[in-house]
Image: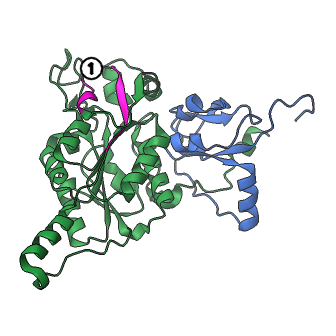
Amino acid sequence: MSATDVLSCEFENPVMPYLRQERLPHIWCPGCGIGTTVNCFTRALADSGMDLDKVAIVSGIGCTGRVAGYMNLDSFHTTHGRAIPFATGLKLANPELKVVVYSGDGDLSAIGGNHLIHAARRNMDLMVVCVNNFTYGMTGGQVAPTTPLGATQTTMPYGNFETPFNLPFLADACGAVYVARWTVYHVKQLAKAMLEGLKKKGFVFIEAMAPCPTLYSRRNRLGDGVDQLKYYKEKSKIVNGANTKDVGLSLFQGDIVVGKFVDRERPTWLDAMNEHFTQHFGEKFTPYGVSHAQD
Amino acid sequence: MSDAAPVKKGKGTIFLTLEVCKGCSYCIDFCPAHCLEFSREFNRKGYHYPVLASPEDCTGCDLCGLYCPDFAIFGMRFKDIEQRRQAAAPEPLIPARG
């Protein structure tokens, strides 16, 4: 078999029907992990067998915010940090939709941090995918709330001294029903977690660690994107059901605990509201949005 | 292929849209069969793209397809390829933009 045989494209890539092909190639840097998480998400969508008209994707601002523009779904690219409020409105206006919030760590935990904790507290029926690259990629590598201690950033040239967020712990403490963390190295597990998240009812939080070769890795002299993936491979330990208190990523290039941490059941906001008003008003109240088409 | 002791029979192959590849080497470094390597040529954007260096080792497991951030590469097993060829006329891939 010659090299030209291999390069001839006879078949379409199986992920192509899920992407807006006229927008490709995408803008992400070579070695960026966001594309891989999108790849996992398309596989999860394909495996879930969901009607794509019943899935909506919402994203905020940032490199990861671009995902909404590349997915061949109903999508909205919201203002900075406001992906979850928009998704909440979308979900409540049309409870048949499965709404996916796909955004970065800066958008979800810094600017939209308040919305994240309150959506988790209410157990809004959303799936939140947080691509954590430890920095603000699009604006030039400023310190994010997830930057590990000691990492050099443009706004912390002598190393970061602020204690970062432990995002799975935050989501767990606020009441998310499904919390998982995987890295871009664990593609199969990430795709499976996204599939479980699509099937799960309630607030699902999936943290996907991704390398940022252009800003985070280059500022810290960590090599290319693939070198970060090798670090994930070497230092990550799979502990399913680990106490989320112990899974923080505060050490620079330290150990990573990955896995599915939380999987529990709680009534969603709509279920709680329907139950509450049915108790109060009895037959006079018509429950709202009880038929979930995809359940 | 020569008939002198084939070490492993190939089970699959890869397909690549080489113009969208950005040469991140995820597929090359994490191929479980270690059968990919960088090409000597550049694509139109100036990146080295992966080529199937040892086609007899490729199992068509599609892990390269799952890793690829640019949706450029994917693997397929020969039996699935045959199945698809028999099922319908394959659709052409979109032309890559430079």
The residue that appears at 70% across and 48% down in the rendered structure is B77
Classify residue A201 by image quadrant. bottom left
The hue in which chain B appears in the rendered picture of the protein: blue
Range of magenta residues = A245-262
Seen from the viewer's position, the closer of residues A184 and A294 is A294
* Looking at the image, residue B73 lies above or below residue A98: above
Secondary structure at badge 1 equals: loop
* Residue holding disc 1: A251
Chain of residue at mark 1? A
Residue in the picture at 20% in, 76% down = A288
Residue A100 rendering spot, x and y as whole percentages: 32, 57
- Residue B38 versus residue A276: which sits nearer the camera? A276
> Does the segment drawn in magenta span residue B98?
no
User: Looking at the picture, which amino acid does disc 1 mark?
Assistant: Leu
Q: A130 or A188, which lies in front? A: A188
Query: Residue B8: x percent and y percent?
Result: 80, 33
Depicted A28 relative to depicted B31: above or below:
below
Total numbered circles: 1
Looking at the image, which residue is at 25% across and 30% down? A141
Q: Does the magenta stretch include residue A251?
A: yes
Figure chain in green: A
From where the camera sits, is residue B68 visible? no
Position of the N terminus of chain A by quadrant: top right
> Viewed as shown, does residue A184 lie left or right of B33?
left
Residue A56 visible in image: yes
Pick the residue in front: A27 or A37.
A37
